Structures are given as C-alpha cells and as structure tokens.
Amino acid sequence: MLNRQMVFDDIARHAKRQRQRAISGLYCAYRSGDGGKCFIGVLIPDDRYTPGMEGRSIQTNIAAQDAIDPKYGLVRDDPYWHDDRLFLSTVQGVHDNHDPTEWPHYLVKLAANYALSPAAVLEAA
C-alpha cells in the first residue's frame, strides 16, 4: 500500500522549494526543461524517468506508475491499487490546476480529505 503520508510530506517540501509549476511547452510535465518537477515527478528518481512518460496523467500512465520510487510502496497487485492511483491523480491535479500560491491551501484540504497530517505544508508556509 502506498505510504500516502510520506508522499504528501515529500510533495509539500518540494512545493516549498520549487514554488512554480513544472511546464514543458504549454503543459505541466513530470520534468520541465529547467529542471523542475511536478508533484508526481518528484516521486520518480532521475534514473527511472524517461521522456516517454510525458503527456499522460498518472491515473493511466503505467510507465510513470512503475517509475515511482519503491520506497513509497505503490504496488500494482495491492488491493488498494485503485485508491492509490486516485490519490496520486488528486495530488497531480493540485499541481496542474492551481496557481502555486494556492498550493498550500489545496494541500491542506487534500491532507484533511485523506486523514493525513498537514504538518509538512504548515512548516513550509
């Protein structure tokens, strides 16, 4: 099962550091040309990333799902597989659909919806 708290904490810390969307062309990207990473991209180690992952949501992107660092516990055969993909898709939506100045607000809401501690966001504010 995906360790959602670990994912959330790492994303919140990343959001604090980067403070801008990872954009390639007109669209959000797992990796941007300037070295930026989206909220899902930060979960993918550099040696597991390939440009072929770009252009698709984490919900349907098997290559990106498989590339997520194993330390987070995303396992395809897990009974929580569907719920974990939904969580990751929601996280991706915060990055892709909201201005970076709004990320703390939406991350705190996400934490509440998933019964996670928002401490990493509050520390980052």
Image (cartoon, grey):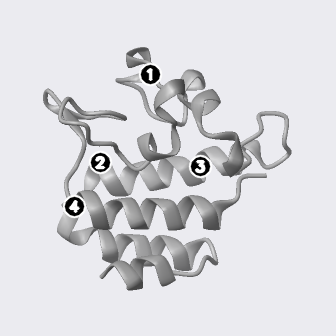
> In front: mark 1 or mark 4?
4
Q: CA distance from mark 4 to mark 2?
A: 13 Å
> Quick one: 22 or 17, which is closer to the camera?
17
* Residue type of the residue flagged with mark 1: Met
- Location of mark 1 (residue): 53
* Residue type of the residue flagged with mark 4: Arg
Mark before the other along the chain sequence, 3 or 4: 4
- Could you say which quadrant of the image residue 15 lies in? bottom left
Mark before the other along the chain sequence, 2 or 3: 3
* Residue type of the residue flagged with mark 3: Leu
Q: How many marks?
A: 4
Q: What x and y, as percent, mark residue 44?
A: 51, 37
- Location of mark 2 (residue): 96
> Quick one: 125 or 60, which is closer to the camera?
125
Mark before the other along the chain sequence, 4 or 2: 4
> In front: mark 1 or mark 3?
1
Left or right of 47 on screen, residue 80:
right
> Quick one: 82 or 37, which is closer to the camera?
37
Tag 2: Cα neighbours inside 10 Å, few (<14), some, or many (≥20)?
Answer: some
- Location of mark 3 (residue): 86
Element under disc 1: helix
Element under disc 4: loop
Q: CA distance from mark 1 to mark 4?
A: 23 Å
- Could you say which quadrant of the image residue 100 lies in? bottom left
- Location of mark 4 (residue): 19
Q: CA distance from mark 1 to mark 3?
A: 18 Å
Q: Residue at x 52, y 67 (%)?
A: 9
Q: Is residue 56 above or below residue 88?
A: above
> In front: mark 3 or mark 4?
4
